[in-house]
Image (cartoon, rainbow, N blue to C red):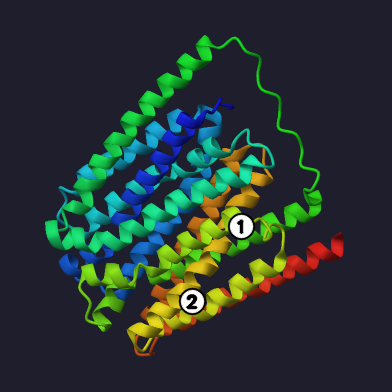
Amino acid sequence: MTIKKGRRFKAACFTLEGVGSFSVSFYFYYVYFLMRDHFGFDGKHNLAFAALIGLIYVFSAWQAGRFAHRCGYFTALKVGFLMMILSLAVGAQLGSASGIVLASAFFTVGQCFLWPTIEALVSEGEDAEGLPRAVGTYNVVWASTNALGLFVGGTLVETFGFGVLFYLPIALLLTQLALTLWLERHVQGQAAASNQPPAPAPSPDPNRPSPAKARAFLWMAWLANPFAYIAINTFVPLLPSLAARFQLTPMQAGFVCSLWGFVRLATFFGLWFWNGWHYRFRWLVTAYAALIIVFILILTAPNLAVLLAAQVFFGIAIGLIYYSSLFYSMDASETKSEHGGIHEAALGAGNFAGPAVGAVSLQFFPNVAYSSVMAVSGLLSLGFVALLAIQWYSRSRR
């Protein structure tokens, strides 16, 4: 599916992305505080909850990307927004832990229809010069509203109560659904009124790496990104436990623990305007090595100074890893929604694996200090070895 894109169209797509990112991040950053305060969830229970959501995300994102390619981008967006709105509306009326988990599961399925679709909409048809700009804008938009969701979410919860977790995203998602319907009518009217021949395919980039090298970097980025999300989604469910250790309220936790999100945003800006990292293995492997170290530091920090310093390097590392995965996914594919779905499914694999390993370690080694941190850092180390192995194998085959 190819859609003619102008500035207004792109702006509308980035609006859908930004508002959706805020809604999702706000809900999932603070639903763990809801589960702790209302249902007595500790770190192990929140990690198990996060693992379930991640497992659902893996299969849903992959299939949602294929659905968007087969059935159309606007159909996928409408399905996603309706599922998310209905899930939150039902979840707001449920007063049990199982009800919130079920509503969150359906909310997760719904959001999976958004990201591969929007990634494809903003990237499809771009040439070698336009693609980095499109991917850069995409990353900056979602990272800024994601960081904002964590930063202000605690304040919103303390001010309005946990009900705001449901009602604010519902209001935002309704506006997105309305914007999607307007966009669909606008594009259909534009197509009906146009008698111009289709635009020619983008010209190939003479500086592109060889297909073998591009494929190797795609696989390395698809490997590294889930491991980055292993770190993120072990950290996020443990936010309530981390806040309790430093005696932080939800609002204070939002202020203190959102630094990495803003650093990731700054990293996206830097990578957007500087292309020297494209297809350079040393950047990817250095970011991954740093990720392991700072992950351990964040969750074992003896004081707030160490926690804040570690978040700076955490944000840089995951920023470069995520950017690599999305850029190589879009750069190497003609079926962008399907590759976007694979990119998101790989992300979901990390969402599942990190919390799952952390929860299992707390179940079997509850008296070992930081057992979940040690287990997950061991898993991250295996990913580092696999990254080196892919690079060695790909170079030996060129």
Q: Is residue 111 above or below residue 265?
A: above
Q: Residues within 10 Å of mark 2 (few under 14, many from 20)?
A: many
Q: Residues within 10 Å of mark 1 (few under 14, many from 20)?
A: many
Q: Position of residue 244 (x, y in %)?
A: 24, 79
Residue 210 vs residue 155: left or right?
right
Q: Is residue 44 above or below residue 246?
A: above
Q: Which residue is mark 1?
A: 324
Can I make out residue 274 in this image?
A: yes
Identify which amino acid the numbered label 1 is placed on: Ser
Residue located farthest toward the front when viewing the structure as drawn? 273
Can I make out residue 379 in this image?
A: no
Q: Residue at x 33, y 83 (%)?
A: 304
Q: Secondary structure at mark 1?
A: helix
Q: Which residue is mark 2?
A: 376
Residue 358 vs residue 29: left or right?
right
Q: Secondary structure at mark 2?
A: helix
Q: Residue at x 39, y 39 (%)?
A: 16
Identify which amino acid the numbered label 2 is placed on: Val
Q: Residue at x 40, y 54 (%)?
A: 144
The answer to which image quadrant residue 44 occupies is bottom left
Q: Quadrant of the N terminus?
A: top right
Q: Position of residue 246 (x, y in %)?
A: 26, 82
